[in-house]
Amino acid sequence: MNTWALAYEGFAPEHEGLREALCTLGNGYFATRGAAPESRADGVHYPGTYIAGCYNRTVSRVAGQEVENEDMVNAPNWLPLTIRTGDGRWLGGDDTELSDQHLALDLRRGVLTRTFRYRDGDGRTTRVRQRRLVSMDDPHLAALETEVTPEDWSGTLTVRSALDGTVTNAGVARYRDLCGRHLQVGSTGGDVPEETWLYAETSTSGIGIALAARTRVTAGPEPDATSVASRPDWIGCDLEIPVLPGRTVTVEKTVALHTSRDKAISDPRTAARAALARADGFAELLRHHTAAWRRLWQECAIDIGGEEQRVLRLHLFHLLQTLSPHTADLDVGVPARGLHGEAYRGHVFWDELFVFPLLNLHLPETARALLRYRWRRLPQARAAASAYGLRGALFPWQSGSDGREETQRLHLNPRSGRWLDDHSHLQRHVDIAIAYNVWQHYRTTGDLGFLAEFGAELLLEIARALSDLTAYDSHLGRYVIRSVMGPDEYHDGYPDREAPGLDDNAYTNVMTVWVLQRALEVLEELPEAGRRQLSERIGLTRAETARFACIAARMRVPFHDGVISQFAGYEDLVELDWTAYRDRYGDIRRLDRILEAEGDTCNRYRASKQADVLMLFFLLSKEELTAILRGLGYDHHADDPDLIPRTVVYYLTRTSHGSTLSAVVHAWVLSRTDRTSSWRFLCEALRSDIDDTQGGTTAEGIHLGAMAGTVDVLIRCYTGLAAQDGALRLKPSLPDELAHLSFRLRYRGHRGIQLDIDAAQVRVAVPPSSLSPLEVQCRGESTHIPPGSDRTLPLRYPPRTRPRQR
Ligand code: BGC
């Protein structure tokens, strides 16, 4: 099996959207779905090109209300290329005319190859092979090479290559009642027929987008004629090429893309045309593009063998296409669904929590830039906190261009057809995710400059808002946090309470304690002058930090039946008859929609969409959690060795996994107690997108958090890898199904550290450099490995007690 390839045979209209999403090519700056070049949005195909951070805002009227939404814009389509054989019809629109279709994504080189045969209405048969790339070398370039071979005819082959600004955002059926037109097309033109350009602007954000294209015959006879047709929103050039049977004609389309958000340009149109003029032909572009991918794979290599290996590569591939080294120079966040489709409108959620660990270990500059995205939006987050009467910064649940809250206030249940109130903006834990990422980035990179420059400010402002979110309940003698939602989106309120929100979501409360403790620690870490200046600048007082400490000692954590309660009052909810619902509906991952359509609500039941309490065991080690609980005076629970395993089992049986993030978290939390189940969950998370397990959602964009999360489970969870006082700590415990695991990472300046782990040993090789030796702590022993050398450390496993199973 080729673990570097994703291949599809034939054509299946029902799977086309999924294939397009999974065959997306991108470079962190922009990405283009793997749609056929001759296709248009027709319900089966959906060509889409998305530029990182390119958003636009529109107002629509639904259910009698005006709703404003900000969307990641479907940019003008650069792909269109079609052919006409003789005087027949243009290829496109009727897939039954095509045979022997084959689509292959080369993950190593980032090249999508498509081959097919085309039989026109007059019986002429033509073979076509197309290769495309979105350059990882130069983020403003893309190219499409098309080889056409007439099998049994001679005459005129006409190739039409276009730039299409008529596109709209129409990729998600649920949003089609909402306004999807974001582009105002300005102009088109070109000096010679082979070179055309199109300029468009987004309607409210005013982002200028320019595409310039060159279409040329690079092998085969010169065209007899070339002509251009244009409108302000579309421009195409036709090449009429005399062809003979068996003689292949090669046509190359090279495209440059710039927007007015780019640095070092005068205007996007001039920039795109100049970039195109400088651009090489396909072969050279491919050479540089492949070399850029080679460098990336060298740094991000991971090897586990088997079918999982291929999916892992696919996940890393899409992660690197969404967040690449080019991202480090952009003002963008982590789009939950990649640059691969329009689900969630390209918004940025807490999902970065699942993405950062990998970036910290592979592309720390990119991770830093993504934290900058948050930092730049502090003024908006401060305003949001202030609107609630809080100090500090309250980041939005969904973020886009300027960091205001982008969460929709109404959402459609496609099952019932009803538009419903959406309270998901009450997920204040997004602040926790950002603070956690700041701390982890600092711990992994040891970059004190980052902390001093902006990391500490972010973390402290978040700590302030979380601290102000708490209230002291004198009856309980504890601090509480009211009216929030946890990660489990099925519960947005109490069944008998009008106002939305839940009290004392355990995840939010415990992690708030953790954030407040880190805030105090950060103040300690900063040099005296830096601490003073920062506190003065943001007006942080001693009284406030003293309050941090009080809260961190008296926060409420609810418990019931010997487990941590998801929120206060959870025990009053009724049990769901899971078997009955599974029997009736089969797939109950979207139990919320099922119950709502029945006139019921998840709020009545002990039924979760995804890991909520269990997030605590995902983010904190047993020791950290125990210390927090003990610090809060919950000694009885902290000392209970079964608290964690009992809580895991309790919620595991009450979770529908309606989010792909859930399987990742479960793979993690089960890894020490039930490695077989952990592996099963990891495999499930690996299937999320390739098998579209959430039923039709991948076509609307990949699930970036789950993709990154699966790789992270291997790299950090099964290896116990963590940054510990500058050393790299390892505590491997591979599932029985995993015979070996090899990968590379970057740590504290060492680039390309190689780890090879199996049940018996771990080998660590440190690449040559002038850095100090790398300290590795493995199973309690510390080893210093000088650059340019390696060490093999034995692992002593307890004898296997479980039979091997698959
Ligand atoms: C999940 C959230 C997630 C969002 C975006 C939702 O289905 O419940 O946790 O942030 O998708 O991926």
Image (cartoon, helix red, strand yellow):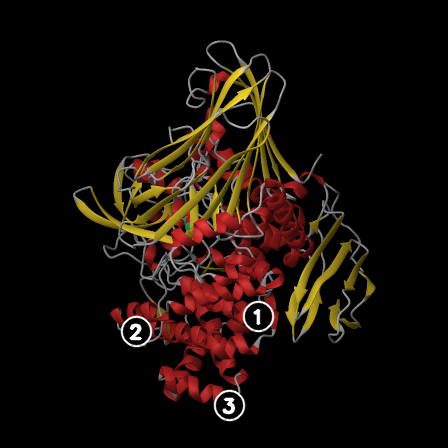
Q: Residues within 10 Å of mark 3 (few under 14, many from 20)?
A: few
Secondary structure under badge 1?
Answer: helix
Between disc 1 and disc 2, the foreground one is: 2
Camera sees residue 721: no
- Disc nearer the start of the sequence (3/1): 3
Q: Disc 3 to disc 2, how far (Cα)?
A: 27 Å
Secondary structure under badge 3?
Answer: helix
Does the numbered disc 2 mark a residue whose Cβ is under 8 Å from ligand 1? no
Tell me the residue that label 1 is attached to. Answer: 624
Name the kind of residue labelled 3 in the image: Glu
Residue 390 is labelled as 2
Residue 144 is labelled as none
Residue 528 is labelled as 3
Q: Where in the figure is residue 447, as x and y percent of width and height?
A: 58, 75
Between disc 3 and disc 2, the foreground one is: 3
As displayed, is residue 178 above or below residue 442? Answer: above
Q: Where in the figure is residue 681, as x and y percent of width and height?
A: 59, 45
Q: Is residue 693 left or right of residue 590?
A: right
Q: Residues within 10 Å of mark 1 (few under 14, many from 20)?
A: some
Q: Disc 1 to disc 2, how far (Cα)?
A: 28 Å
Residue drawn at 71 percent across, 53 percent down = 734
Secondary structure under badge 2?
Answer: loop
Between disc 3 and disc 1, the foreground one is: 3
